[in-house]
Amino acid sequence: MGNAGADVDFAVGMGGAECSPHSVPVPPARPFLDTFRENLKETFFPDDPFRQFRLEKGGRRFVRALQYVLPILDWAPSYTFTFFRADLIAGITIASLAIPQGISYAKLANLPPILGLYSSFVPPLIYAMMGSSKDLAVGTMAVPSLLMASMLGKEVSAATEPTTYLHLAFTATFFAGALQASLGLLRLGFIVDFLSHATIVGFMGGAATVVCLQQLKGIMGLDHFTTSTDLISVLESVFNQIHQWRWESVVLGCGFLSFLLTTRALSKRGAMFFWISAAAPLTSVVAGSLLVYLTHADKHGVEVIGYLKKGLNPPSTSSLIFSPPYMMVALKTGMTTGIIALAEGIAVGRSFAMFKNYHIDGNKEMIAFGVMNLVGSLTSCYLATGPFSRSAVNYNAGCKTAASNIVMSVAVMFTLLFLTPLFHYTPLVVLSSIIVSAILGLIDYGAAFHLWQVDKIDFCVCAGAYLGVVFGSVEIGLVVAVAVSILRVLLFIARPRTTMLGNVPNSMAYRRTDQYPTAQCFPGVIVLRIDAPIYFANTNYLRERISRWIDEEEDRLRCNGKTGLQYVVLDMGAVSSIDTSGISMLKELKKTLERRELQLVLANPGSEVMKKLDKSKVLEIIGQEWIFLTVGEAVGACNFMLHTSKAENIGVEIGAALP
Amino acid sequence: MGNAGADVDFAVGMGGAECSPHSVPVPPARPFLDTFRENLKETFFPDDPFRQFRLEKGGRRFVRALQYVLPILDWAPSYTFTFFRADLIAGITIASLAIPQGISYAKLANLPPILGLYSSFVPPLIYAMMGSSKDLAVGTMAVPSLLMASMLGKEVSAATEPTTYLHLAFTATFFAGALQASLGLLRLGFIVDFLSHATIVGFMGGAATVVCLQQLKGIMGLDHFTTSTDLISVLESVFNQIHQWRWESVVLGCGFLSFLLTTRALSKRGAMFFWISAAAPLTSVVAGSLLVYLTHADKHGVEVIGYLKKGLNPPSTSSLIFSPPYMMVALKTGMTTGIIALAEGIAVGRSFAMFKNYHIDGNKEMIAFGVMNLVGSLTSCYLATGPFSRSAVNYNAGCKTAASNIVMSVAVMFTLLFLTPLFHYTPLVVLSSIIVSAILGLIDYGAAFHLWQVDKIDFCVCAGAYLGVVFGSVEIGLVVAVAVSILRVLLFIARPRTTMLGNVPNSMAYRRTDQYPTAQCFPGVIVLRIDAPIYFANTNYLRERISRWIDEEEDRLRCNGKTGLQYVVLDMGAVSSIDTSGISMLKELKKTLERRELQLVLANPGSEVMKKLDKSKVLEIIGQEWIFLTVGEAVGACNFMLHTSKAENIGVEIGAALP
């Protein structure tokens, strides 16, 4: 290590080394526990969330810890009236969305509509205490509601056994909350990162399409409908019953849908129109109720919500089902919906944190979501998260802190206590229109087009997830999405890039020959670069690929009548880490090349590679003298050896020819 | 691309750039189908197995194709008498192992002992025709036999329903063969690579331990034994029945075991002793049979094999079970044992190919194994593969081609037709001793110790798999092994290394500051290196980690009273590929740094990174003028800007101070 400073790149061109190359040091050994503790920290605490605590002491540290667990203690003391005014406006705005959307999504999940209001009362309060995002608005979401209906509906019919179905929904929410909190506590949040953006775009788009298709039942006013969710079944069901479409429903539905879509399109034109679009759902509900009340349309076949119980959330602790056979389906549903809700909520929180330039701890957010759903499952709520559309409204309405959730919660409480009779005459077709208009935003054409432009493989992944959902089922689509994501990750590892390098003329840099056509190769020497760490998952591939590079180059040289290769230089600059299989691979490569009378030369190996080569004694097998600091030095030394041996051969021939 | 040749590294130290840096070109666009086809070829055909065909034409090409599918057509025409002599000796040697081991392993799998001989007759013939390895010796293996007994035994008891159990074993073998052949045909062989060497060492060691523990039943001569395989249950079962140990069995067992272990230890001392060790199992069988015959020990409670039917393999086509409920357990068993047998067989084939310096196509070998097992399942054989111990004997006995398998097959046929009555009196305790002596080699202490020395994480993985098998069950151990392997792969991706670089004095090289303590950092500039490709699985981590690097450096500078950072240089040399999430991350990073009044500078981006930056328009956001070919040029430009602005400031101050 003492010679560390002597890393000098000399101008080494053809002909030989100007001075002796420098040795690559083996880093000093570090105790295993040190490196293990460091790796553990990098894996689970990359953002070092406890850094702030080290600066504090004693009592302050306890207060800091409490503030860490309950962020409300952090921002509440500095709460001002300006903040309150902004949060009040934002809170009322999102409440006006929460009420109609909550009722709609609850019907989407085949649950009693009042549950939508319950789920916009308790969970936001918990989140306001424990959550870190200033912009996230808590509420139920369409896709998890659909998934819940789909997965629970396979075992228990909501029509024939509504109580069991309801209790299963609470149990599933309990499990979802438990999963979310556990992932956060164990700091396994990076698992959510494995769902790539492309798969999420495809999956959400497909789920949104399925939800829209489901709403055709409400809009057409059909009584009987397919239980399958795929496109073919739904279109069949709709067009086989053309004569049963109710014109009143169709007219009402299309009317309100156009209104909602128009306000939505308008909102993009200017900030002023934003308020119109935010108020549109509640306006539709009121208008629809009035219309039905005045025309007595409910007597003419237009379905309405009906009676909604007054009062706050009843406790549901005794409703949870923990016994087979139903517990398994609740567990499965809870885990699936929990992960999806988590992925969305974390993504939303991170996006807004980036807009407003503050930082949120993903794992801490997961704990907040988990506790929110655990408490919700005990108070008659079902799965809640931070939907993007509602949080965007919150952001646009100018929210300042998570107190906007408290305001929304209070507004919903007010509705629960006093205003539920107002929804008696609300036609279901209006709810369907609200769902469709809200969910169309999830079908992100822009993102899909962007994927097509930048990375067509990503686009194929996205399309695969979309088609899996639309033509299969939501679960099939989800499995396809996750499988493709993981497969792509595994393929990245299993098929690393290797390239051949050449010397760019008049310089010492070595670049890829396919990117720089003028890069030259030296006779007798081939320079290969391995562009990834060497792990068990790719050692076999790398060994075969390197052999193939050598074979192809020797074929090419033989066809052109030149002398064969003598040196194989491996540029290890990008091999940031290596495991025991990788070390074995290098050892076997050395032996194979020896048998072919080729010399293996390593250039620019990193510290971890050197350490492991040394500990496994492969360093001695390869030979310290064949390890160089840069590719330039390595090639220089090879050229020197080639010319020296050539000179020796010529000298021998001359000597033999002399009398 | 025209300026590609002008990649020059000037000596840029502190003070400024000597001349203008060079632009990094965006590579020209290639049609998507071209790159897709190339990637497909790299993924599935890395060793380019059809290269030889391109050189041939017409009729020759057809012959070549036939030789590719049936390698026997390749080596048979050039078969000489010398080869035959070597293969004859090797074949007879491995037959002398195959017969006792085959019977033993069949009993391990709770199958009729004759199946062990059937499985050493048909499968080796198929392999000799289709296999590529010259040294692999085909036969049954202990670990898959154990797994089969364990997994099938959960559903069907071999004692009470032997016929169903037998048919399930054939069906499981059928599915195993189908899986192996499919993996080979679809060229999905790289899936086997995902079981790291560490996990295989741990799992095989654990399975071998379990097998040895199971043999205690035979050696102690116990009638009743636990069905569980874990250590605690077995020891309990053995020591609770101390008074029922049969001293005859114990004496015989320990005697033969010592004999076998001694010859095995001797064989390592010299080539001459190898033949003694190879002949030892058959000798033990003969000696044991004689002993029992002469002492009539079978009347005194020593269990013997009993009647073995004469004759070749009866067809078993009608025995396969394809109907629920049993088909599922056969399918599961077949898939599990098939994968393990494949992993071992491929590893063995590759090892010997490397010793003898020839190449085998892993996927083609898989097809050979698959067909071998498919045909075997139709001819009363159960799962066969290429066990390492038998192949090592084949290799040491001097085999030259796969014809040694044909010789072994003929020898077994001879035994089946004429010699089966000889095994009537063979005591089971001799079979147990043979199993134990053969399997002790699977507990590879040397490999585990090597893992401990070189990579302690790999050692933990190995230990985890071992303990999972020994204290849980074989299935639990396998699940633990696979899960840990996959998790390790995912973690490699999810937590890439990032390091801070400094300039090594008197040179232009930038190296890690933790490896080279003399490396200097320039004021106002931080140089970070990302040591891995940027994918969706690690973008969030990278973003947080880079922020943390910057925060820590700014804290450090502030504590030392120096000026803050102004430039963040990212060395992208190791970022060999990037996807859309990675591109988004760079865009967000640029915006975040802008808000912190820091300038983002990229150094040495590869061609794929440049291509995607350009297509996504992020290149314009970052600015082409902030992308440099090397870290040296980037830092040089930053220093130049810093000094220029400092000079300007001084000039402004002077100007302001002047009257």
Image (tube, coloured by chain):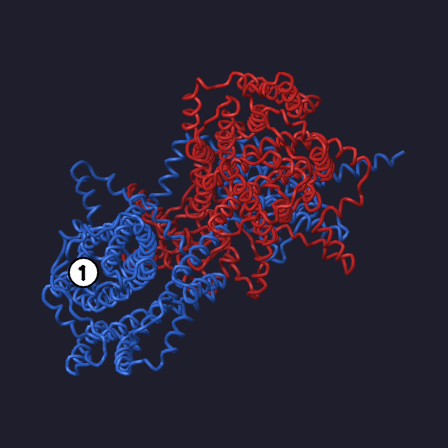
Chain colours: A blue, B red
Image quadrant in which the C terminus of chain B is located: bottom left
Q: Is residue A212 left or right of residue A381?
A: right
Placement of A502 over or under B405, stated as above or below: below
Which of the chains bears the disc numbered 1? Answer: A
Question: Looking at the image, which is closer to me, A509 or A166?
Answer: A166
Task: Pinpoint residue B406: horizontal percent, then vertical percent.
Answer: 72, 39
When asked about the image quadrant of residue A222, the answer is bottom left
* Left or right: B38 as drawn, with respect to A217: right
- Please say if A320 is above or below B515: below
Question: Quick check: can you spot residue A9?
Answer: no
Residue A189 % position (x, y): 34, 49
- Quadrant location of residue A63? top left
Q: Is residue B579 above or below residue B399?
A: below
Residue at the image point whose x is 22% and y is 67% from the top: A103
Left or right: B137, with B562 as reference point = right
Specify the amino acid type for callout 1.
Tyr
Q: Is residue A86 above or below residue A324?
A: below
Which residue is tagged 1? A118
The residue lying toward the viewer, choosing from A632 and B158, is B158
Q: Position of residue B40 (x, y in %)?
A: 57, 57
Front one among A119 and B515: A119
Q: Quadrant of residue B87?
A: top right
SS at mark 1? helix
State the residue lying farthest toward the front. B299
